[in-house]
Image (cartoon, rainbow, N blue to C red):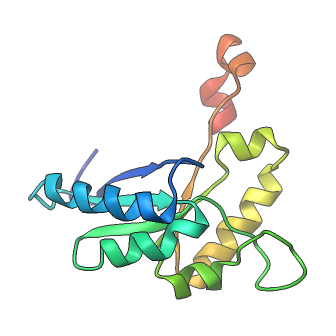
Amino acid sequence: MNRKYRKTVIAANWKMNKTPSETKVFMTEFKNILPKGRWCDICICVPAVCIPAAVRAMRETRVGIGAENCNPNPSGAYTGEIATNMLVDAGCKYVIIGHSERRAMGETDADVNAKVLAALEAGLIPIMCCGETLQQREAGITAEHIT
């Protein structure tokens, strides 16, 4: 990779594993071990309920906070969903879209496309996941599928 044209991004998420209180503790500990170099961007995507705690804890660091999913609609009767403008207002910079776990629940390429477009429109940096199924990998069509 030519670093002149591309910046490395290290992104992580922790799925459904931390409460807001645990997020605060984790982020405080994480700040103490952050590398000093600026050769990459660092992003931690957290469950929606943990976003405010993560944003507060990392306020004066170079770590960007993101969400683990979004809804492509700007508002409406979508119980349990979160819109991109809500994520931006909460302090998110990134959002993971199309994670394999979401796809296993039925999310389609069209769904992912709509979410990516909504994220870009809102000013978020989408982290679009793409990958092959085990069957596709075993059939040797990984590159074809991802392309």
Q: 91 or 141: nearer the eye?
A: 91
Location of residue 125 in the rendering, given as x and y in whole percent from the top left corner? 49, 69
Instruction: Describe residue 6's horizontal placement relative to residue 111 as left or right.
Output: left
For image coordinates 78% across by 51% down, the residue present is 109
Instruction: Describe residue 94's horizontal placement relative to residue 72 as left or right.
Output: left
Q: Is residue 115 above or below residue 130?
A: below
When asked about the image quadrant of residue 67, the answer is bottom right
Location of residue 139 in the rendering, given as x and y in whole percent from the top left corner? 71, 12
Residue at the limit of the structure toward the left, as seen here? 36
The quarter of the picture where the C terminus appears is: top right
Instruction: Describe residue 143's horizontal placement relative to residue 81 as left or right.
Output: left
Marks counted in the figure total 0
The quarter of the picture where the N terminus appears is: top left
Location of residue 4 in the rendering, given as x and y in whole percent from the top left corner? 21, 59
Residue at the limit of the structure toward the top, as seen here? 138
For image coordinates 64% across by 78% down, the residue present is 84
Q: Is residue 1 above or below residue 135?
A: below
Q: 36 or 136: nearer the eye?
A: 36
Location of residue 122 in the rendering, given as x and y in whole percent from the top left corner? 60, 83
Residue at the limit of the structure toward the front, as seen here? 21
For image coordinates 41% across by 69% down, the residue present is 54
Q: Is residue 38 above or below residue 120?
A: above
Q: Is residue 49 above or below residue 101?
A: below
